[in-house]
Amino acid sequence: METDDAWDRTRLVWPAAILVAACAFGLAWFGATVMLKDGKSGKGSPDQQAVLKSLDARMSTAEQQWKAGLQERAMVAERITQIEKSANSNIRRNRTEAGALIEGFKRETSRNFEGVQSRLAGFESIQLEMLAEVARLREELASVKQELDAMRQAKEAEQN
């Protein structure tokens, strides 16, 4: 949040700097017009010359500060543009990577699911074979029981 505070302070300084520059320009202009009306054409009293030099120095300082502020704003704008480009590039790359991860996950899940289905089909096949074998063994057991019953009856008939 330090950056926000710096921007707030900068926003407060700009109007003051512009006001100071405008006042300095106005005083210089007013002083020059007064001197021209008096016909002195730049040669006034030492006090007037000192005031003009002071105003000129202040005007130069204000102009330099204003230019420095413009350069700083341009540098900040350029840096923000670079950050935006970098962020957009990172977002696009991350989206691409996320899409690739999702597709890989889908392929892997599909492959695993197909493997599970294949195993399940194998188990079902084995189970069907076992059921067929159990049914055959039951039929064989039933026929052996019938033969055994027939043998018992034959033996009982012989003994009687």
Image (tube, helix red, strand yellow):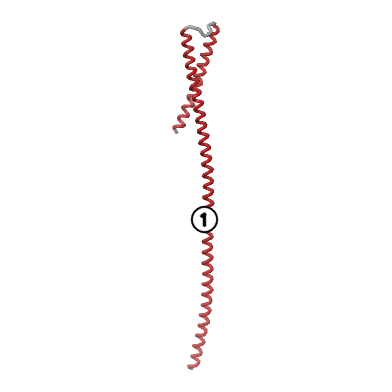
The residue under label 1 is which amino acid type?
Answer: Glu
- Relative to 120, does residue 21 appear above or below in the rendering? above
In front of the other: 142 or 35: 35
In front of the other: 146 or 80: 80
Tell me the residue at 52%/42% (across/down).
91
- Relative to 32, does residue 105 appear above or below in the rendering? below
- Relative to 34, does residue 76 appear above or below in the rendering? below
How many numbered dots are placed on residues in this image?
Answer: 1
Tell me the residue at 52%/16% (across/down).
25
Residue at the extreme top of the image, as rendered? 39
Label 1 packing within 10 angstroms: few (<14), some (14-19), many (20+) = few
Residue under label 1, please give it. Answer: 108
> Secondary structure under badge 1?
helix
Tell me the residue at 52%/61% (across/down).
115
Q: Percent x, y for residue 50?
A: 46, 11
Q: Percent x, y for residue 150?
A: 52, 87
Tell me the residue at 52%/47% (across/down).
97
Q: Percent x, y for residue 49?
A: 48, 10
- Relative to 34, does residue 70 appear above or below in the rendering? below
Q: Which quadrant of the figure contains the N terminus? A: top left
Q: Percent x, y for residue 72?
A: 49, 27
